[in-house]
Image (tube, helix red, strand yellow):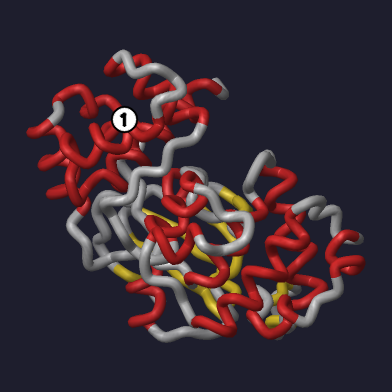
């Protein structure tokens, strides 16, 4: 599949902005990974997005990459209302918020707690290879179903080096099966092991609530540098973001997060 003349997209920006963990670079402007039960290699050339996938039709991948959203208009609206964010929207100009499976997002961000990116990736791939169905011809496995993780033994999860997160993973799978997909931040906070930051990540990346504004260590520093917030005032930061950015707060968070974190690595 080839999606032509896509504006405001850069695969490194999309896959390296902290929203997903199963995509890895395999060449210039090219990544390999999995979305749900499908594996794919995606590449970008002159604004044309090529998707070589084991499954999923054009509608699935168009929705996954959020290709029908006008990110140029989003960036303009953000910078018109808050000029201070312009350097971040220019630096991460190719970010698009993926439409990810809610259950996969819940478990992935539970694993992300007090963890680093390489270890998060390793933990998730171990979970997939142990409990997910193999994706034919890819060498990858699909993300595990709620049923598979609800039936998992804690000792077997512990063998995957998941630490204290083992109980959270199984309990969340059990709750998901019993109550269905959560729809609100309050419902997410009722899950064992999900706190405010993780709940907001799931709202933004799994439930498509673009007003959600996750506050982690990077965002605390950003809000301190830009607006003088006390580093401990997460509630104040979120209230400010809601007033300043409104329904676009999630996009603002991604641009700012990527801008600060990526530059710190260079």
Residue drawn at x 21%, y 48% as measured from the top left: 248
- Quarter holding the C terminus is top right
Mark 1 surroundings: few (<14), some (14-19) or many (≥20) residues within 10 A: few
Number of disc labels? 1
Query: Residue 75 in the image: x percent, y percent?
Result: 18, 42
Q: In this view, does 71 lie to the left or right of 93?
A: left
- Quarter holding the N terminus is bottom left
Q: Mark 1 points at which residue?
A: 236
**Residue sticking out furthest to the left:** 80
Q: In this view, does 195 lie above or below 253?
A: below
Would you identify the image quadrant in which residue 90 lies?
A: top left
Residue drawn at x 41%, y 60% as measured from the top left: 186
Q: Is residue 173 left or right of residue 15?
A: right
Residue drawn at x 62%, y 69% as measured from the top left: 172
Q: In this view, does 96 lie to the left or right of 171?
A: left
Q: Nearer the viewer, residue 92 or 236?
A: 236
Circle 1 — which element? helix
Residue drawn at x 14%, y 29% as measured from the top left: 82
Q: In this view, does 26 lie above or below 99?
A: above
Would you identify the image quadrant in which residue 204 lies?
A: bottom left
């Amino acid at each position: 599949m080839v999606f032509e003349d896509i504006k405001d997209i850069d695969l490194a920006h999309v896959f390296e902005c902290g929203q997903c963990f199963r995509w890895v670079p395999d060449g210039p402007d090219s990544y390999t990974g999995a979305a749900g039960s499908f594996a794919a290699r995606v590449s970008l050339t002159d604004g044309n997005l090529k998707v070589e996938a084991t499954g999923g039709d054009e509608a699935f991948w168009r929705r996954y990459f959020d290709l029908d959203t006008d990110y140029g208009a989003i960036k303009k609206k953000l910078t018109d209302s808050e000029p201070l964010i312009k350097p971040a929207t220019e630096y991460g100009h190719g970010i698009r918020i993926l439409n990810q499976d809610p259950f996969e997002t819940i478990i992935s961000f539970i694993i992300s707690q007090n963890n680093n990116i390489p270890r998060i990736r390793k933990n998730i791939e171990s979970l997939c290879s142990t409990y997910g169905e193999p994706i034919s011809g890819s060498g990858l496995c699909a993300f595990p179903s709620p049923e598979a993780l609800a039936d998992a033994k804690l000792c077997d999860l512990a063998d995957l080096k998941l630490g204290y997160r083992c109980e959270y993973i199984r309990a969340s799978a059990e709750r998901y099966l019993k109550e269905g997909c959560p729809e609100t931040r309050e419902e997410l906070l009722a899950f064992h092991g999900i706190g405010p930051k993780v709940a907001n990540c799931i709202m933004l990346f799994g439930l498509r609530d673009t007003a959600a504004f996750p506050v982690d260590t990077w965002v605390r520093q950003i809000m301190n540098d830009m607006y003088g917030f006390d580093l401990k005032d997460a509630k104040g930061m979120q209230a400010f973001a809601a007033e300043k950015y409104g329904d676009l707060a999630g996009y603002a968070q991604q641009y700012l997060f990527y801008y600060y974190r990526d530059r710190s690595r260079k």
